[in-house]
Amino acid sequence: MRTICVYCAASTKIKPVYFEATARLAKIFTEAGMSVVFGGGCSGLMGQLADSMLAANGKITGVIPQFMCDEEWHHKSLSELIVVETMHERKALMAKMADAIVALPGGCGTMEELLEAITWKQLGILTVPIVIVNMDGYYDSMIEMLHRAVDENFMRGVHKNMWEVVATPEEVLNAISNSANWESNSRSFAAI
């Protein structure tokens, strides 16, 4: 079974289309026999992802810092909950467990996780596929900024191969399968 790391929002005040798409993605993963690792939260898209995975008898593991558990922000019915001390430990463990990373829409935490994963891939620390689910054009500005970084020589053209962009959950598995191979020796061309 492959494990997919999913970055997504904790906000409960977002458009219903994002919740519906998250539920569809969970169903796609369970039907494909894939497990999920995520940030362990109980609200927003994180809660939707967990509830949908569990409803479909899928396996979902949460990784969450102790201070978030102290605030009762963790999902209490996961297949497994791993409690760590810091946000840094959380992100490192989620990435280590992942065979691929999928970013759904989210706020600064989701965007920070996504950009860190792209940075780690550029440095050869991470080599797994990264898929950005750009529902309703949510990530258009970020993708434009990444392309501008290439255009202005802050990154190489080949670095555009570090991520795939799709518009719907139904495209995620193909994007993972068709993702460009990335080797740990990418460090040799990380800088321009």
Image (tube, grey):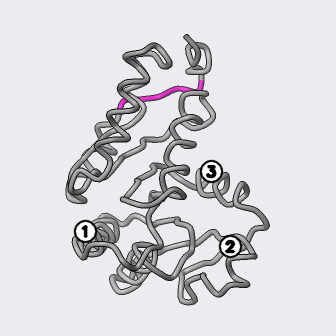
- The residue where tag 3 is placed is 96
Q: Residue at x 45, y 15 (%)?
A: 156
The count of marks equals 3
Contact, mark 2 vs mark 3 (Cβ under 8 Å): no
Tell me the CA gap for discs 1 and 2.
Answer: 26 Å
Q: Earlier in the sequence, mark 2 or mark 3?
A: 2
Instruction: Give the image location of residue 117, x and y in percent.
Output: 54, 43
Q: Amino acid at mark 1?
A: Ala
Answer with left or right where residue 142 lies relative to residue 155.
left
Q: Earlier in the sequence, mark 1 or mark 2?
A: 1
- The residue where tag 1 is placed is 21
- The residue where tag 2 is placed is 82
Answer with left or right where residue 95 lies relative to residue 23.
right
Tell me the CA gap for discs 1 and 3.
Answer: 26 Å
Dominant secondary structure (helix, strand or loop) of the stretch shown in magenta? loop
Tell me the CA gap for discs 2 and 3.
Answer: 13 Å
Label 2: few (<14), some or many (≥20) within 10 Å?
A: some
State which region is magenta.
Answer: 180-184
Q: Residue at x 37, y 58 (%)?
A: 104
